[in-house]
Image: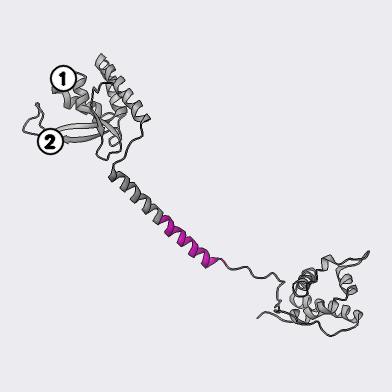
Amino acid sequence: MNELIQLTTNEQGSAVVASARELYEFLGFDGSQWSRWSKKNIINNPYAKEGEDWEQIELDIKSKTSEGGRPTVDYAISVDFAKRLSMLARTEKGEEARRYFLECERKVQKQPFSLSVEQVLLQQAHLLVEQGNMIAQLRADVESIRGTVRLPKPSAPPHLKRTPQLNSPSPKRPASDLRQAVKHRVNEYCGYHGAEQGDTYNYLYRRLNEVWSINVYRLIRLNGESLLDAIERYGHLDKMYGLIMAELKYVEE
């Protein structure tokens, strides 16, 4: 494909553009009407956006029609905008230019645009800045989380103060007496603190497992037996009573 109109990159090197003046001359328009044509079709074009479709540039050379040595004004226009301006001509030259820019557009889309060294460095600098901002935000989030999140406390009913370890159960007492003592202490504790008996017993069952490795839920129960019945039958009431005396009698300050 012959190069009818030279294509280059804009000042930022980010887009392919053409010279509006060169397109105007190729279309065969009257050179003296350039200023009028460019103002109407480029500057005041309601369908063209400055900075996206066109950018004004000043050339070092002086045009034949300029007066008083004024610099020549040109416009760097996008390939798409150049294609639209060519269609407005409605001449054979306009159709030829339109086809030319259409083909150029296809080639640009097929070939990846190569960045200059300066552009690559600029992109990398932007990425580093963004990464730095992300890291700073993550650090701030972590510090915020550290300031608000608390480690979970061991689950226990209200007003209970757990002992580190029990070395031995309380002295042996008759099973019937122990049963009554356990019930009495639990009732007394729940009445004083307003605690639920079910929650208190569940806490004691859990502590039996934690301190003495006695899983009361695995004890074989006879027909109609409660967990407390099974604990009594297996001979673990003394350990349970020891937990009650060691833990339920304390109140957190």
**Nearer to me, 166 or 44:** 166
Left or right position of 130 against 237: left
Crowdedness near tag 1: few (<14), some (14–19) or many (≥20) residues, C-alpha within 10 Å:
few
Magenta stretch encompasses residue 177: no
- Amino acid found under the numbered disc labelled 2: Asp
**Marker disc for residue 105:** none
**Nearer to me, 193 or 248:** 248
**Spot occupied by residue 79 in the image (x, y as percentages of width and height):** 30, 28
For residue 74, say whether it is visible: yes
**Marker disc for residue 30:** 1
**Nearer to me, 220 or 47:** 220
Up the image or down, 126 lies above or below 23; here it is below
N-terminal of the two: label 2 or label 1? 1
Left or right position of 21 against 124: left
**Spot occupied by residue 50 in the image (x, y as percentages of width and height):** 27, 35
Residue located farthest toward the bottom when viewing the structure as drawn = 171
Majority secondary structure of magenta residues? helix
Distance (Cα) linking label 2 and label 1: 22 Å
Magenta segment: 133-149
Quadrant (top left/top right/bottom left/bottom right) for the N terminus: top left
**Spot occupied by residue 84 in the image (x, y as percentages of width and height):** 30, 24
**Marker disc for residue 60:** 2
